[in-house]
Image (cartoon, rainbow, N blue to C red):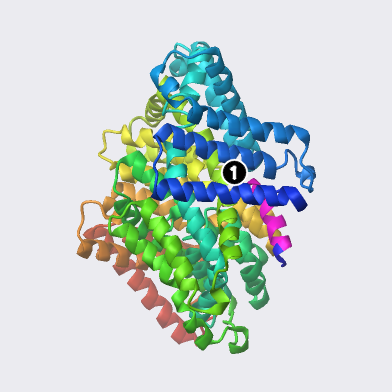
């Protein structure tokens, strides 16, 4: 699949990548504007911090201006011409941001008392953000935002517990654009301060061919193993997740290479697409970046970033271990082989390029040392340039650096629009108290019991996460769904509640009916989209089990535990995933009957649940089942394929 075909496929399923194909003067203009956006972010972050509201407003103005120049209003308008109204929208987008820069002191002095001009500018900002988000992010988040805005305005006409006094138009616009709890709120702050720089880091990594190296390294590590291409997919997607902020982009980028390989050695089309979709979605829960949600989670829960990243580590490893186990048993069941030596990259060549991973480990080291995320990202970018200079093939020219700056800015546009929209949702929640009302409604429906509340919150998170990018996904689910868990009498740690809704919001990418990652994978695999979505849900079953476990047993998140206990929890949980994986696929040492599948799944779940009694019962049951299969296989003289 060519680069053009890859971009077309990404644009089909992810609006974030559906750019105009500009040429000539406007191509140069938008390229320069994007470079200036990145230069501004680097300069302000490293040298001259601006007042928070001003910095966020300028960040927004750059974002809106570029969005209207680069993203067409419809798919049919992706040619090289920009219509007059998009020039006007771009100018207005830049203008509403610069309004804060030019009038900061006056706006600060008259907070709560707005002029007619303020109201016009604020109203324009709301409308422009919604239009921009519609183009870049898609319908779901815009629809949710509009519903919340209407709810704020018409609150006095709402039924039951949803009723509130209602908010005047002046107060609503003022809240949305002239306070720190609206468009310029915490979500956009995280975009302007942290996320942009990490996307820029990923762009620089891409220019040094790290993405391609991930595939080669994955082939080298896992290619020869049974069902090798599927295991390559898992390993590659876990690595890609450190630099990618999109499940769909991850699917299409690595899937264009891995899905045909999986089909070629004998995996079913739907299964091949499902492995890629679930693995790529898992990249969004993989620390240290977690689709940039790690920084949002640190802000929302008032938890140090390093603690958030560590808390996410064991669940993410269990998620990928679960997929690895599933593809292994599926390969055993089908009698599939690994790749031949001639199909793999040379070991010497792969090992010689290991130095390309230095910036990633350096970045992790910077973050874990307590250095601010902004400084960590900037030093990470410098380390990419330095490491790339080691060899001519990866050395970045001045043109490459400019290109990386432009690509980084373009990749951030979806995040700018999504976080600005999400800020309005947070603003309405703050203004109306709907978050607490929704939580109380869920609690009442669940009878105040933990498990029913978790199930209802899971369904709400899956619904709210449909078709929404990672950062906005987490903002919405954490604002609306997480308070229900926190409000319980059961002492659920705040971080566990937020991680719970984050997991299920991300799982919406592979869960029908709106399973964008699964549908993108099905497009490459030439498989049935709905069947691929169902298969993805089965392959990624760990994502639906683990969040329940870490709410009941926060040791999985390294909360109030020791490393010895954490190691024990991890080892037993991985063994438990073997039981769950064997039961879901229907094969272990031989094919499993239905009642055997149920037994090994139950035993696996007992091992995943931390606790001495559950571990002993789980080990005993799995050990008994394994012994029984071994004896039966020997007695009947069957091979591993059964």
The answer to whether residue 225 is above or below residue 624 is below
Q: Is residue 344 left or right of residue 605?
A: right
Q: Is residue 170 left or right of residue 142?
A: left
Image quadrant in which the N terminus is located = bottom right
The answer to whether residue 138 is above or below residue 291 is above
Q: Looking at the rendering, which quadrant does residue 641 occupy?
A: bottom right
Q: Which residues are magenta?
A: 4-18
Image quadrant in which the C terminus is located = bottom right
Residue 72 on image: x %, y %:
72, 41
Q: Looking at the rendering, which quadrant does residue 608 occupy?
A: bottom left
Q: Is residue 622 left or right of residue 356?
A: left
Mark 1, secondary structure of its residue: loop
Residue 640 on image: x %, y %:
51, 82
User: Residue 36 lies in magenta, yes or no?
Assistant: no
Magenta stretch mostly in which secondary structure?
A: helix
Mark 1 closeness class: few <14, some 14–19, many ≥20 residues within 10 Å: many
Q: At 30% across and 47% down in the image, what residue appears? A: 552
Q: At 45% across and 49% down in the image, what residue appears? A: 43
Q: Is residue 23 visible?
A: no
Residue 70 on image: x %, y %:
68, 45
Residue 177 on image: x %, y %:
49, 25
User: Residue 8 lies in magenta, yes or no?
Assistant: yes
Label 1 sits on residue? 467
């Amino acid at each position: 699949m060519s680069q053009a075909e890859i971009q077309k496929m990404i644009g089909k399923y992810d609006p974030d990548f559906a750019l105009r194909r500009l040429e000539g003067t406007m191509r140069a203009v938008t390229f320069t504007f994007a470079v200036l956006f990145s230069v501004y972010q680097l300069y302000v972050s490293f040298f001259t911090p601006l007042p928070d509201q001003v910095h966020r407003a300028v960040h927004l103005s750059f974002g809106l201006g570029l969005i209207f120049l680069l993203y067409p209003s419809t798919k049919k308008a992706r040619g090289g011409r920009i219509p007059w109204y998009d020039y006007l929208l771009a100018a207005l987008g830049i203008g509403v941001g610069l309004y804060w820069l030019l009038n900061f002191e006056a706006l600060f002095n008259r907070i709560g008392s707005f002029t007619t001009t303020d109201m016009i500018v604020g109203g324009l900002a709301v409308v422009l953000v919604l239009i921009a988000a519609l183009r870049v992010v898609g319908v779901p988040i815009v629809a949710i935002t509009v519903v919340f805005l209407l709810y704020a305005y018409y609150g006095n006409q709402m039924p039951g517990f949803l009723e509130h006094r209602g908010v005047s138009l002046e107060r609503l616009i003022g809240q949305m654009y002239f306070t720190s709890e609206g468009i310029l709120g915490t979500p956009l702050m995280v975009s302007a301060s942290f996320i942009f720089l990490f996307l820029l880091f990923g762009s620089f990594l891409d220019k040094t061919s790290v993405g391609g190296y991930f595939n080669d390294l994955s082939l080298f590590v896992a290619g020869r193993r049974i069902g090798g291409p599927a295991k390559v997919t898992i390993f590659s997607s876990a690595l890609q997740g450190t630099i990618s902020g999109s499940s769909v982009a991850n699917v299409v980028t690595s899937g264009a290479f891995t899905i045909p390989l999986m089909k070629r050695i004998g995996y079913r089309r739907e299964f091949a697409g499902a492995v890629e979709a679930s693995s790529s979605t898992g990249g969004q829960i993989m620390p240290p970046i977690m689709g940039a949600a790690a920084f949002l989670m640190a802000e929302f829960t008032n938890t140090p970033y390093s603690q958030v990243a560590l808390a996410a580590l064991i669940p993410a490893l269990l998620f990928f271990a679960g997929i690895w186990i599933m593809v292994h048993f599926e390969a055993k069941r089908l009698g599939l082989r690994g790749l031949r030596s001639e199909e793999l990259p040379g070991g010497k060549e792969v090992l010689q390029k290991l130095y390309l991973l230095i910036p990633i480990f350096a970045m992790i080291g910077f973050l874990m040392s307590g250095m601010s995320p902004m400084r960590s990202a900037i030093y990470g970018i410098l380390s990419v340039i330095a490491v790339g200079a080691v060899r001519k093939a990866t050395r970045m020219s001045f043109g490459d650096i400019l290109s990386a700056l432009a690509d980084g800015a373009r990749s951030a546009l979806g995040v700018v629009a999504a976080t600005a929209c999400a800020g309005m949702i947070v603003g309405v929640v703050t203004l109306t108290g709907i978050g607490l009302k929704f939580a109380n409604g869920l609690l009442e429906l669940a009878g105040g019991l933990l498990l029913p509340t978790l199930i209802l919150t899971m369904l709400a998170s899956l619904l709210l996460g449909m078709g929404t990018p990672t950062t906005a996904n987490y903002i919405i689910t954490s604002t609306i769904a997480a308070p229900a868990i926190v409000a319980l009498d059961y002492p659920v740690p705040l971080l566990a509640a937020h991680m719970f809704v984050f997991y299920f919001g991300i799982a919406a990418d592979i869960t029908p009916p709106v399973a964008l990652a699964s549908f993108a994978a099905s497009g490459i695999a030439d498989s049935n989209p709905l069947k691929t979505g169902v298969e993805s849900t089965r392959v990624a079953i760990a994502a639906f089990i683990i969040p329940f476990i870490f709410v009941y047993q926060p040791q999985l998140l390294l909360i109030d535990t020791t490393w010895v206990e954490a190691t024990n929890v991890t080892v037993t949980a991985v063994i438990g995933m073997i039981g769950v994986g064997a039961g879901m696929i229907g094969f272990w040492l031989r094919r499993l009957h239905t009642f055997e599948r149920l037994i090994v799944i139950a035993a696996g779940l007992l091992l995943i649940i931390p606790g001495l009694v559950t571990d002993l019962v789980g080990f005993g049951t799995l050990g008994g089942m394994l012994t029984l299969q071994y004896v039966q296989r020997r007695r009947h003289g069957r091979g591993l394929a059964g």
